[in-house]
Amino acid sequence: MSRKFTKTVAMFMYIFLTGFPILSWGQQAIGDTTLSSGENGSGTPYISPVNDFCRAISVDEQNLWIATTKGLEKMNKITGEQTLLTMKDGLPDNNLLDVEKDKNGNLWICTQTKGIAKWNGTAWTQFTGENSGLLNNQYCTRIAFDADGTPWNATLGALQHFDGKNWETFTSPKAAIANFWFVYALKFDSKGQLWVGGSALDWSFAQMEGPKFKILDVTNPVTAIEEGQNGIIWLGLSNGLATYNNNVLTKYDSGNFDFSTIRDIKKDAQGNLWIASGKQLVKMSDGHFTIMATSDSEIKCIAPDTDGSFWIGSINGDVFRYVKSQNSLSKWISGIQDIKTSAILKVEYYDLNGISTTITAKGPKIIKKTYLNGNIETKKIIVK
């Protein structure tokens, strides 16, 4: 058995058993390690999905739908009432990786071991390799919808498109071992272009160019993708923030601002970027970075709502709402509930430093640090 193959198998078993993100054998800084078409993974970045509670949030007019490791959490945005849907309710797997709603109101749910589930509100449909040509039932990590409303799924080893009956498969043109990859981000831009971010033996950033999977970068694991102003693509990397513009990927100079763990990036109606960086919710506007709020644990996902607020899911299962006019985090769920239903309203407010507080007429002084290219530029004190 070859040394490379032994390393690859050992690496995969470690990731599969632990579920925690790692950097592969000999990973170096951005731009230092590349993989040519003749190699099989020596020195290639590799990260697995994180084993956490809140993995994704989908927002509709009335509810939040939260993909967790314990099932699908439904929460009414007005009353706070929660319902946990599990395998007892027809969900094929309680360990979920993503949830998205299509234009017809169907929920599409990515599972860790049982393929994809679709729920129309009353009935479940399960898609697996056995009944629909899904390449792999394990680690269906992300799902997104094209302009026609049909889903694209990222599963362990390939990107797939659903034609209404079966899944068409697209994979890397290089990989000798195609199943050693994870996709962390799928993004359709304003022109309908599909961008793919993840970590694999031979790619980390790609796009679908017609029917072809086109590799754009191989060295920097991509954890988040968002389209910014002027069509610029913003990328969250395993070690920073980057842009992709005019066929060039450039690491953004954030100075001493720490972007070591970016898990999500979302754009608001004004074109500002909101970045989940470790425990911080960071706003980027015209090159300025501002720490807007801090969570008790690492932020996993950001879900914009139609009223301009954001729903924020964290790794320990807490779900917060950030309201820009209040400059505060409001906790809605403290951990993922095991009970079937519960009525929990907003129970705590957090200031911008993540400290629990009571909002009064005069209230606490909240310090917002504003950064320009990573350097502290101003401090604003807000009195509530």
Image (cartoon, helix red, strand yellow):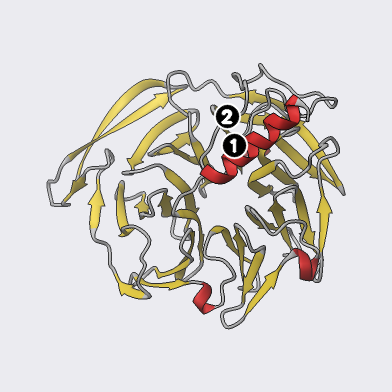
Asked if the residues shown at circle 2 and circle 1 are in contact, with their CB atoms under 8 angstroms apart, the answer is yes
For the residue pair 358 and 315, the one nearer the viewer reads as 315
Which residue is painted at 75% across and 51% down in the image? Answer: 192
- Evaluate whether residue 272 shows in this view: no
Q: Is 174 located above or below residue 44 in the figure?
A: below
Image-based side of 12 in relation to 59, left or right = right
Q: Quadrant of residue 134?
A: bottom right
Query: Given the image, on which type of amino acid does mark 2 rest?
Result: Leu
Task: Return the x and y of residue 229 as percentages of the image width and height.
Answer: 61, 38
Q: Residue most toward the bottom?
A: 122
Q: Residue at x 38, y 61 (%)?
A: 336
Tell me: residue 292, above or below residue 7.
Answer: below
- Distance from disc 2 to disc 1, alpha carbons, whole Å, reads 6 Å
Q: Tag 1's secondary structure?
A: loop
The x, y position of residue 313, in whole percent, is 42, 52
* Viewer-nearest residue: 149 or 127: 127
The disc placed on residue 47 is 1
x 38%, y 39%: residue? 279
Give residue 364's mark.
Answer: none
Left or right: 331, with 30 as reference point: left
Q: Is residue 376 above or below residue 216?
A: above
Q: Earlier in the sequence, mark 2 or mark 1?
A: 2
Label 1: few (<14), some or many (≥20) within 10 Å?
many
Q: Find disc 2 in the rendering and name its residue.
A: 23
Is residue 239 visible to the viewer in this orientation of the structure?
Answer: yes
Kindly indicate the quadrant of the structure image that contains residue 368.
top left
